């Protein structure tokens, strides 16, 4: 807290006169009303965000009707406005009077200068006006066409040549508008054959992207704190791009997630990290001081670049705590982050398996038939595995365990498809089956899969609980130390554990007729070196030990002390209070939010009242069991500290929610999956993902003129 006294001049509230102190509203409109009543000119230029964080008004400036009836003098109504400013004026000395008279003269002179300047600006504007009204109407028509196409995810352009432009969706939509009597377009078309070539069309789409992003970021700023999330990089126009999402709680107390664009990750780690952060803050205008957490999901060769970006964000903004992302299973995320050839072989094969069985329902039936063959006397087990394998089982927390149970049936299935004796499968399907078969019969794959299964079994329940209900996530945070202790015990006794794992892998390889050997690439790199390394030793030093150590390190990074304390603050949810038998939420954990809550001094008393409120449940009564339900309570506004804590917990990427907050993420996945490579566009994706943004065509035209001031002087010709 940088300001604990009343912002009104000559008011002693908050210092010598102990009064309840209230933050300025975060909402810009309400905040402006407070400032107007305060009679402090220097506050007029300050943004609502800064006023909310650093300035207060004491209770003596509010009428009794401004307070909530159930909490007189302590809790303001939502629409409360300060109205009492009849403070006794301080005696004025002659020096003060002369200073005021001088200020008044300067103010009069200043007003005169402003009037002259205004006239000069008006004359200058008339002299430099180069954008006629007809041009503005014309640009509005173009933007309307683009918005219609973008919302429907229809690529506006054809190929780069003239014939492609004539056949483009954008051109066709303009022709339709002209045929329907759009006079502005019709006149320009008939008069000078004017329209947009690919370069001008690209400019219009970029303006749409910038406008949409500015509206989204403005919405985020109005609602305060947010989380930064990224996902697997995608390739667009030969560049690898990182999709960026923002998670925040709206004024309606509903969780929102928005897609704001792509960040290029083509350069080296440190360089690209600095550049990406610069784009977020300087180009996009994102206030990273309001970022309270971040989460990233990446695998493959670009993992190190994303890791460097996360480290750069943490370095610059320590409050942006690195966390786990709930949209991915913890065990799969941990495996994706391991840069070992054997582990990457397992993860890439999982992706091939997922894609392979999506090609045809007949392939899935073939797989289920193979499962029945390997479980002839265990019908219940076979049915359970079949049910699991009808889903995206390679993305589950128990994916490695399931893979070990079906690996022999899987190999039988892909070998049968590759043989293609009855000629049911296409050449592409048989080729894909062969690729999977080669991976499954590699001992490095078998060993890596088995180690992953035995190590991640310790984190399986922990990851599953994190993706569950609030009570389960709270339980996971409380028990997190037991998980890391178990992993450390495994690391300390690696000789014993590895012997068991290696023997199990050899037995499975023998059953599948797979030779036990050191990877060929390793042998090639070490040709001519003295001594021959044994498979047992190789896999211990290059697989078992690194996997365990990496998972311990990754868990410590993703679940640091601050993150775990945040998760333990889920104890403020009513159903968890009731389950804990009236135990008050631990104030020690909640104090990590002291810099963000409105009244830290009253936190202890407020938590006590909150706990008492929910500690006893009447017969048949149900308590809110999630953050979303708790935020929707009508009386949560009477607990301002608790309200802010609930909002901060809601934006944690670690927590999974049953409402529609991940619509943007699922929409993005569908967009990338369905959009043809030749039509993928960064700008179009931003427009399509945020189809519900309110568009102001006049503002878009102004933005276009600012971004491309010379583009309207001469328009290109429309091809015949």
Image (tube, grey):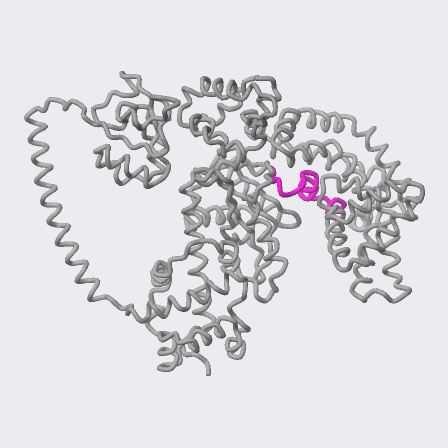
Left or right for 20, reference 262: left
Counting from the top left corner in percent of width and height, residue 502 is at: 85, 37
Q: Residue at x 76, y 47 (%)?
A: 346
Q: Nearer the viewer, residue 625 or 277?
A: 625
Q: In the image, which residues are magenta?
A: 324-345
Q: Nearer the viewer, residue 153 or 235?
A: 153
Left or right for 266, reference 541: left
Q: Residue at x 37, y 61 (%)?
A: 697
Counting from the top left corner in percent of width and height, residue 568 is at: 58, 26
Q: Nearer the viewer, residue 680 or 86?
A: 86
Q: Would you place residue 575 above or below residue 419 in this image? A: above
Any magenta on residue 683? no
Q: Would you place residue 418 above or below residue 276 in this image? A: below
Quadrant location, the N terminus: top left
Counting from the top left corner in percent of width and height, residue 235 is at: 60, 58
Left or right for 478, reference 389: left
- Residue 595 falls in image quadrant: top left
């Amino acid at each position: 807290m940088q300001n604990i006294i009343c912002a009104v001049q000559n008011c002693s509230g908050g210092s010598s006169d102990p009064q309840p102190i209230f933050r300025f509203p975060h909402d810009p409109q309400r905040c402006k009303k407070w400032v107007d009543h305060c009679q402090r000119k220097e506050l007029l230029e300050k943004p609502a965000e800064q006023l909310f964080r650093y300035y207060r008004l004491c209770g003596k400036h509010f009428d009794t009707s401004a307070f909530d009836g159930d909490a007189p003098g302590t809790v303001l109504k939502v629409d409360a406005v300060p109205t009492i400013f009849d403070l006794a004026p301080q005696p004025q000395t002659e020096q003060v009077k002369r200073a005021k008279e001088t200020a008044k003269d300067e103010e009069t002179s200043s007003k005169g200068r402003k009037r002259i300047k205004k006239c000069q600006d008006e004359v200058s504007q008339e002299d430099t006006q180069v954008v006629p009204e007809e041009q503005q109407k014309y640009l509005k028509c173009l933007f309307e066409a683009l918005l219609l196409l973008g919302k429907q995810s229809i690529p506006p352009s054809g190929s780069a040549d003239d014939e492609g432009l004539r056949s483009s969706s954008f051109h066709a939509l303009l022709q339709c508008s002209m045929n329907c009597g759009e006079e502005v377009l019709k006149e320009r078309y008939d008069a000078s054959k004017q329209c947009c070539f690919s370069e001008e069309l690209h400019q219009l789409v970029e303006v749409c992207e910038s406008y949409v992003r500015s509206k989204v970021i403005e919405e985020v700023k109005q609602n305060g704190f947010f989380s930064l999330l990224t996902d697997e990089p995608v390739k667009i126009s030969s560049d690898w791009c990182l999709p960026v999402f923002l998670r925040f709680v709206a004024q309606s107390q509903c969780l929102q997630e928005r897609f704001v664009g792509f960040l290029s990750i083509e350069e080296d780690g440190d360089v690209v990290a600095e550049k990406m952060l610069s784009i977020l803050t300087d180009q996009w205008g994102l206030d990273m001081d309001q970022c309270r957490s971040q989460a990233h999901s990446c695998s493959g060769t670009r993992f190190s670049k994303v890791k460097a970006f996360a480290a750069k964000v943490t370095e610059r903004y320590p409050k942006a705590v690195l966390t786990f992302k709930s949209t991915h299973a913890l065990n799969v995320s941990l495996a994706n982050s391991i840069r070992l050839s054997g582990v990457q072989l397992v993860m890439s094969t999982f992706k091939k398996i997922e894609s392979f069985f999506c090609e045809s329902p007949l392939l899935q039936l073939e797989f289920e038939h193979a499962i029945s063959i390997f479980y002839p006397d265990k019908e219940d087990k076979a049915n359970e595995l079949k049910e699991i394998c009808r889903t995206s089982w390679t993305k589950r927390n128990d994916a490695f365990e399931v893979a070990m149970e079906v690996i022999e049936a899987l190999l039988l299935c892909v070998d049968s498809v590759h043989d293609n004796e009855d000629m049911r499968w296409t050449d592409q399907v048989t080729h894909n089956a062969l690729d999977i078969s080669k991976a499954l019969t590699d001992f490095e794959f078998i060993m890596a899969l088995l180690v992953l299964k035995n190590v991640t079994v310790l984190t399986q329940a922990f990851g599953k609980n994190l993706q569950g209900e609030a009570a389960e996530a709270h339980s996971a945070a409380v028990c997190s130390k037991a998980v890391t202790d178990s992993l450390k015990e495994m690391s300390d006794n690696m000789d014993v554990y590895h012997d068991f794992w290696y023997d199990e892998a050899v037995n499975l390889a023998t059953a599948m007729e797979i030779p036990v050997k050191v990877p060929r690439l390793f042998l090639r790199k070490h040709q001519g070196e003295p001594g021959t390394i044994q498979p047992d030793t190789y896999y211990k030093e290059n697989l078992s030990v690194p996997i365990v150590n990496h998972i311990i390190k990754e868990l410590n990074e993703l679940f640091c002390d601050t993150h775990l304390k945040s998760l333990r603050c889920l104890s403020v949810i009513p159903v968890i209070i009731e389950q804990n038998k009236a135990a008050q939420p631990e104030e020690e954990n909640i104090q990590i939010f002291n810099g963000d809550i409105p009244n830290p001094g009253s936190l202890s008393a407020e938590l006590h009242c909150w706990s008492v409120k929910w500690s006893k449940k009447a017969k048949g009564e149900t308590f809110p069991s999630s953050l979303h339900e708790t935020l929707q309570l009508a009386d949560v506004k009477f607990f301002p500290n608790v309200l802010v804590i609930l909002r901060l917990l809601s934006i944690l990427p670690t927590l999974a929610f049953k409402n529609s907050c991940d619509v943007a993420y699922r929409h993005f996945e569908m967009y990338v999956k369905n959009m043809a490579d030749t039509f993928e566009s960064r700008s179009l994706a931003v427009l399509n993902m945020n189809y519900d943004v309110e568009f102001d065509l006049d503002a878009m035209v102004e933005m276009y003129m600012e971004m491309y001031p010379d583009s309207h002087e001469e328009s290109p010709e429309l091809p015949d």
